[in-house]
Image (tube, coloured by chain):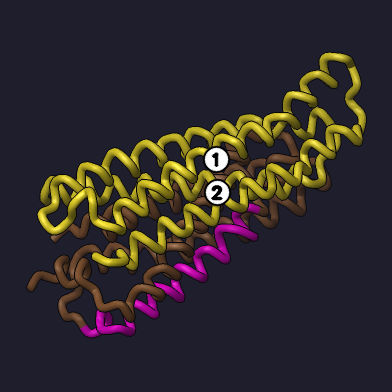
Chain colours: A brown, B yellow
Amino acid sequence: MGLSMLAAMRPDSWNFPLLVHVFGAMVLVGGLLTATSALAFAKGDVRLLRLGYWSLLAVSLPGYVVMRIGAQWVASKGWDKVDPAPTWLDIGYIVADAGALLMLIALVVGGIGMRRLRQGKGQGLLKAALVIAIVILAAALVAVWAMAGKPN
Amino acid sequence: MRFDDWMLALHVLSAFSLVAGIVLFWVLIFVGWRTDTPEGTLVLNPVAKVGSATVGIGMVGTVVFGLWLAFSIGNYNIWDAWIVIALVLWFLGGALGRKTGEAYLEGPKKAQELREAGQNGPNAELLALNRTSRGLLLQTLTSLVVLLILVDMIWKPWA
């Protein structure tokens, strides 16, 4: 039986961890979409800059944590012992780990930008956070494609 | 990847687009709750348009690619209970989503009127429209219906 077939014909005990994983990932993508939209349309408007940063911090970050907990929960059902791991699983882990690092950088850079907004500065740093958030969003969509389509 | 794998990937990506749009609108509802000025309300319009586009793409994509999969994959049939449930919930979610949009459009409409009248300060009526309890109820119901679709897709009851 192929690994894709195994993933499709999963036992019922995997369903709830999978729901947690997918729900977290959806909230993560929603937060990233909100953050990138608000930061891209801000054009110096402090309200949208704040909305963009807080979407990253208060929506994307919790979404990421829930997604990652769900992922480890599903992995603990046996996927962590599959060797070699299928390509789609590797893509998921790479995007999740790199995404965490990039999100941390975006939050720190954007956080400094938010502090500097009070002195009328910091927009450049928030633009940098926007670029990083776009990269994470694009990578997350690639991960969704890989997880759903299961290449190889 | 086989063609059906691509269809499944696009179906799931559409679902992500739909839920991402709903999450975006939840953020806007939260922000709108404290917004009582026309400028503060209208500045959110471009972000709301992104949400409308992603919800639209998600609604169309989920049903088109989902129906393709129902007819194409041998193990699935369009009359399978979990697929019928998903379709019923999809129509219900669509109807609720339209009503939610209508409820939350009242605020920006009022904000536009106020701005055209030169009234740019805080306005109690605008705040009340941005805090529409009917809209909040409809958005909650829409989100619950979409969550039920997700549960249905994962558990596939009576499959």
Q: Is residue B144 above or below residue B72?
A: below
Taking the spot 48% from the left edge, 44% from the top edge, the residue there is B92
* Residue lying farthest to the left in this orientation: A1
Q: Which mark is residue A36?
A: none
Q: Chain of mark 2?
A: B
- Indicate whether residue A72 is drawn in magenta: yes
x, y percentage for residue A14?
33, 77
Residue depicted at x 16% and y 45%: B71
Residue A104 screen position, x and y as percent: 55, 63
Other-residue count near label 1 (Cα within 10 Å), few / some / many at <14 / 14–19 / ≥20: many
Q: In terms of image quadrants, where is residue A120? A: top right
The answer to whether mark 2 and mark 1 are in CB contact below 8 A is yes
Prevailing SS of the magenta stretch:
helix
Whether residue A111 is visible: yes
- Is residue A79 a member of the stretch shown in magenta? yes
User: Which residues make up the magenta segment?
Assistant: A55-81
Q: Nearer the viewer, residue A80 or B21?
A: B21
- Residue B97 — which label? 1
Residue B25 sits above or below residue B156 on the image: above
Q: Secondary structure at mark 2?
A: helix
Q: How many marks?
A: 2
Identified by mark 1, the residue type is Gly
**Residue B47 seen in the figure:** no
Q: Residues within 10 Å of mark 2 (few under 14, many from 20)?
A: many
Nearest the camera: A41 or A25?
Answer: A25
Residue at 45% in and 53% down: A136
**In this image, B6 relative to A75: left or right?**
left
- Comes first in the chain, label 2 or label 1: 1
Numbered tag placed on residue B142 in the rendering = 2
Q: How far apart are the two marked residues, 2 and 1, measured between alpha carbons?
A: 6 Å
Q: Is residue B49 above or below residue B113?
A: below
| Amino acid tagged 2 | Thr
